[in-house]
């Protein structure tokens, strides 16, 4: 989705802005633009399509000279992805240019008001009202004009603004949209995504909702919503720019799959202390946990499916009822939530609009909140009472992989931690499960190593119209995520089904040669799962079983087998999903799909 960048310093701004925009490409976009101040004019270049077109149009920035500027990648919401609708947008007097992430919900009435006052609109965007409001309110003091403008806006925004009266200054404002300031030496930056800053500086300030900031080459001042200067903590980015590069892999997705064992290790290591588990900078006492009558997990997409797998671990170990709710539904469901509800929010980006909205609604109703988030300083991390970071490092491919498995890892830590404090687990089981948890990174690596024949398996299914994924319990949760991975990057229709539910309708679709991917990693339910495999085989299905190495029960029935090492079924999702991610990847490769940027998708879904 949209991304913004800004630079002020003593070198040419445009090449740096273009480089920053390239780092935001992974988020998904359909047009892009930059605006650079040159004396008392603002040079603007905008194109529909790729950043490469913008580089070509500006001769890599040479045609837009100046040392202070802003840039934008747009994912169209209001108006088609045309050059005119691309940001930055200019005021009618040519004095101001702005870039905007978010949606101005009351733009229609503001637009009418501004047209009545004589302002001319060139685009169909909601954003353009902002720049005309700034022009209208500007009386020589940009800060005052921005504050007056934002007081008129409803919705969400991260704004970057330049003004020819102050050619070395960037002004930014944030409300419900990520905005990070990069602190350099003799130059400063902003972006909606830390990935665009990390090659220039590792020192960053995360702005909070309602804050503004003024950046010049040698100074950064942050203001609160009343315009008072506030002290902000400077945080260090803990990863290098290489972490956000392909590092020799053909695609980010493959690189990120290969990083999963290490990412899960990074998620587990700081929390496992000998035989004890710790939750970062907070603790939950037995008394606090006993006060929890119900846990609600909310998220979207893969994060929701991680919640589906985590539910089994939490319920089984803690004996607290858990429901997993799609954030886009929970918000409007008139949910039964009170101060005895613990809301666990899962999000890789920490910026998913539906998840944020559901979280706010549950907080309003009194829920205590724990966020399991990857992106440091993100909106969801800030909103939560407590945050558990997944420490997966930057995830660039649109299809999440290490984001999902690290969410699982943190959910498992939470389940074991809470069970021990609640006394719902005996010490022997606790120790065995802790050992299993500890072994996950190693077993994930073994899973990757033992599945080198997946490209050949991919060849067998690449031209199928439809694939079925079945499983029971945690295997069902894995089916859901495996099916999503396949459909989102290979565009093959997939259907995930609770294996026992097949015969209540869906089995009508199984006929000769229909591939069915059967997840059989739950020892306790193996016989039941095998019965379901036999049922589909009897209707002609070709079964690919995912099962434990050394277990012959599924092997005897399947046409093809994918092996994973044995682990307790409560944690098996973290292993079983790996070959399914890889299978999706190889099918998409075989079909020539754009792996890292699947059609119609965006990395961080900041619109509802
Ligand atoms: C699928 C995928 C999406 C995200 C979903 C939530 O591969 O990446 O389904 O899981 O959009 O995103 P986050 O976790 O950023 O809230």
Image (cartoon, rainbow, N blue to C red):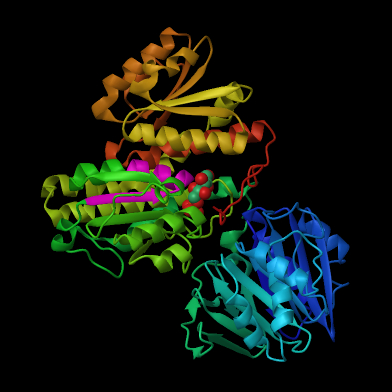
Figure check: 208 above or below 457: below
Q: Residue at x 78, y 75 (%)?
A: 91
16 relative position to 382: left or right: right
83 relative position to 125: left or right: right
Q: Residue at x 56, y 34 (%)?
A: 487
Q: Which residues are magenta?
A: 294-310
In the foreground, 517 or 162: 162
Task: Give the percent coordinates (x, y) of residue 540.
Answer: 48, 9
In the foreground, 345 or 405: 345
Task: Give the percent coordinates (x, y) of residue 185.
Answer: 63, 86
Task: Give the percent coordinates (x, y) of residue 70.
Answer: 72, 73
Residue 556, visible in the rendered structure: no
In the foreground, 117 or 576: 117
Q: Residue at x 14, y 54 (%)?
A: 422
Q: Residue at x 49, y 27 (%)?
A: 495
Figure check: 452 above or below 135: above
131 relative position to 570: left or right: right
Image quarter of residue 66: bottom right
Image quarter of residue 142: bottom right
Task: Give the percent coordinates (x, y) of residue 254.
Answer: 57, 45
Figure check: 266 above or below 5: above
Does the magenta portion include 309?
yes
């Amino acid at each position: 989705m949209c991304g913004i960048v800004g630079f002020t310093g003593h070198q040419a701004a445009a090449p740096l802005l273009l480089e920053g925009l390239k780092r935001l490409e992974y988020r998904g976009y359909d047009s892009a633009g930059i605006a650079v101040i040159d004396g008392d004019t603002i040079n603007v270049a905008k194109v529909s399509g790729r950043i490469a077109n913008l580089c070509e149009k500006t001769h890599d920035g040479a045609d837009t000279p100046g040392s202070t500027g802003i840039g934008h990648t747009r994912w169209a919401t209001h108006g088609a992805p045309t050059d005119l609708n691309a940001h930055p947008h200019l005021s009618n007097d040519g004095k101001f240019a702005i870039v905007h992430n978010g949606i101005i919900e009351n733009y229609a009435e503001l637009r009418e008001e501004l047209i009545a006052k004589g302002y001319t609109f060139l685009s169909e965007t909601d954003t353009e009202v902002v720049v005309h409001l700034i022009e209208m309110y500007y009386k020589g003091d940009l800060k005052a004009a921005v504050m007056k403008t934002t007081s008129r806006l409803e919705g969400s925004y991260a704004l970057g603004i330049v003004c020819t009266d102050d050619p070395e200054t960037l002004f930014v404002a944030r409300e419900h949209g990520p905005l990070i300031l990069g602190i350099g030496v003799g130059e400063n930056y902003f972006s909606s995504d830390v990935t665009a800053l990390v090659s220039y500086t590792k020192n960053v300030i995360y702005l909070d909702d309602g804050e503004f900031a003024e950046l010049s080459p040698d100074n950064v001042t942050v203001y609160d919503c009343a315009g008072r200067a506030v002290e902000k903590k400077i945080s260090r980015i803990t990863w290098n720019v290489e972490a956000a590069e392909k590092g020799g892999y053909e695609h980010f997705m493959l690189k990120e799959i290969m990083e999963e064992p290490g990412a899960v290790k990074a998620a587990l290591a700081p929390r496992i202390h000998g035989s004890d588990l710790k939750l970062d900078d907070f603790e939950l006492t037995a008394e606090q946990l006993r006060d929890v009558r119900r846990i609600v997990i909310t998220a979207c997409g893969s994060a929701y499916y991680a919640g589906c797998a985590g539910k089994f671990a939490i319920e089984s170990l803690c004996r607290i009822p858990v429901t997993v709710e799609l954030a886009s539904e929970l918000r409007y469901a008139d949910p039964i939530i009170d101060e005895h509800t613990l809301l666990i929010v899962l999000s890789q980006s920490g910026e998913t609009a539906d998840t944020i909205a559901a979280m706010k609604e549950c907080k309003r109703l009194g829920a205590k909140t724990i966020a399991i988030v990857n992106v440091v300083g993100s909106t969801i991390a800030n909103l939560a009472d407590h945050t558990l970071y997944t420490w997966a490092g930057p995830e660039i491919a649109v299809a999440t992989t290490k984001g999902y498995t690290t969410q699982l890892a943190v959910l498992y830590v939470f389940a074991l931690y809470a069970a021990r404090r609640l006394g719902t687990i005996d010490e022997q089981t606790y120790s065995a499960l802790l050992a299993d948890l500890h072994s996950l990174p190693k077993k994930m690596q073994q899973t990757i190593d033992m599945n080198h024949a997946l490209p050949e398996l991919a060849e067998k299914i690449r031209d199928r119209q439809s694939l079925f994924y079945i499983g029971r319990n945690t295997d069902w949760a894995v089916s859901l995520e495996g099916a999503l991975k396949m459909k989102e990057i290979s565009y093959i229709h997939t259907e995930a089904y609770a294996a026992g539910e097949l015969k209540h309708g869906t089995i009508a679709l199984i006929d000769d040669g229909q591939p069915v991917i059967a997840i059989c990693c739950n020892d306790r339910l193996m016989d039941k799962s095998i019965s379901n495999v036999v049922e589909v085989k009897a209707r002609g299905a070709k079964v690919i079983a995912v099962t434990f190495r050394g277990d012959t029960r599924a092997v005897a029935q399947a046409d093809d087998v994918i092996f994973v090492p044995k682990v307790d079924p409560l944690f098996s999702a973290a292993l079983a999903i790996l070959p399914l991610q890889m299978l999706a990847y190889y099918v998409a490769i075989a079909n020539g799909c754009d792996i890292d940027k699947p059609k119609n998708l965006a990395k961080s879904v900041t619109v509802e």
